[in-house]
Amino acid sequence: MSSFDPVAIRRDFPTLDQQVNGKPLVYLDNAATSQKPRAVLDVVNAYYLHDNANVHRGIHELSRRATEAYEEARAKVAGWINAADSSEVVWTRGTTEAINLVAGSWGMDNIHAGDEIVVTVLEHHSNLVPWQLLARRTGAKLRYIEIDDQGRLDLGPLPDLLNERTKLVAVSHISNSLGTVNPVREIAEAAKKVGALVLVDGAQGAVHARVDVQALGVDFYAFSGHKMCGPTGIGALWARRELLESMEPYQGGGEMIEFVERDMSTWAEVPHKFEAGTPNIAGAIGFGAAVDYLATLPADEVAAHERTLMAYAMERLGAIPGLRIYGPESVEERSAVVSFTMGDAHPHDISTILDSEGIAIRAGHHCAQLVMKRYGVSATARASFYLYNTEEEVDRLADSLEVVKGIFG
Ligand code: PMP
């Protein structure tokens, strides 16, 4: 008997309880950002109401409290991904900044002309453009892992793609545009054989379940708080302590130094040397509260619920004539995203009609233009699910798509 009840869980999320265009909101844009439970909002509010102060600076009570909560949050987030130590978690603005940190720091010192960076066609622009910029500045070359018709990585050519020139493999854990779950561990094993480091874009990865960065065998893991019940503007980069210690700071400023002289400075301990300036203190504390919240839920049942929703959505949407679903056919190979097109109906028009029914989905290229190119489309419509979605909501989506079908024929 399942103790996880998505209908009851919805009461934790105030935003979900509203009418949009006269209909109860159906929020299916979770891959863009998740809604926030009251537990997170309360913690952020309480911080501003009672403890607001700058961290690591003042020798006074409020600063002590703020610093303690901020560092406790780091430990919670480190625990969620099974980091060996909380000092291995660097706060960033989100996944995008975490990847740019690696490109700007590790990349600029370790990637040289003639080196190769392996990426995949599936990547979000956040895990592509920083490497293009780095390649342009260093004279390195990008090489691509392609995808098959079902949006799965084609690992066949991997032995050829990976060689002594490969310095980094940058791959997403889960594709935001198709939902493909990538075989990160297998890729990491292959990369290790040629001495390349592996960076994982975990923006969609750490969201639905705990992640074990040590078991994955990767070197960098980047993720965002806002996709997993936390606030916007906060995310994290994980890397092993020795690796972080070997890297130069990403930005200079307050908080990240030990001593400052006229011509040189020395750096604060890891992870602080990567955190220049006043950080997003409330955001970090809120991210910690989000992880606390997720940790209270029965992980296996949440995963089973999301899988059931996915399967049901694929069945119902798949039965609509002319609707094409992109990504893996097997539910086992994909995570809570259904990307689709419907004949000549433009995804933006689909999304607009759904919005008039109170249903929020995303339409566009999903910051994955290479994926759109691969399928010869400029955009798709995307419904993405989270733990609080229900089968009734999938029905509302499918029923409304039938209406769209009626309009566009
Ligand atoms: N990578 C993937 C796979 C994503 O889904 C996103 C968010 N859409 C990002 C990177 C970027 O995350 P953020 O905007 O939080 O930095």
Image (spheres, grey):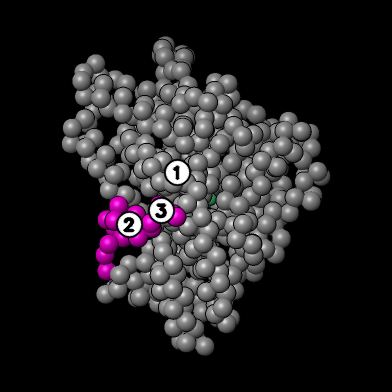
Which residue lies under the disc numbered 1? 224
Q: Position of residue 405 (x, y in %)?
A: 49, 83
Which residue lies under the disc numbered 2? 8
Q: Is 17 contained in the magenta span?
A: yes
Left or right placement of residue 83 versus residue 107 in this view? left
Foreground: 256 or 404? 404
Q: Are marks 1 and 2 in contact (CB under 8 Å)?
A: no
N-term-proximal mark, 1 vs 3: 3
Question: How dense is the environment of label 1, judged by Cα within 10 Å: few (below 14), some, or many (20 and up)?
Answer: many
Which residue lies under the disc numbered 3? 4
Foreground: 113 or 45? 45
Q: Mark 1: which amino acid?
A: Ser
- The residue sitting at the left extreme is 49
Q: Position of residue 323 (x, y in %)?
A: 57, 77
Left or right placement of residue 117 versus residue 209 in this view? right
Residues in magenta, as a range: 1-19
Q: Is mark 1 within 8 Å of ligand 1?
A: yes
As displayed, is residue 229 above or below residue 285? below
Give the residue at x 49% y 63%.
309
**Mark 1 residue element:** strand
Q: Mark 3: which amino acid?
A: Phe
Q: Is residue 341 visible?
A: no
Q: Which mark is residue 19?
A: none
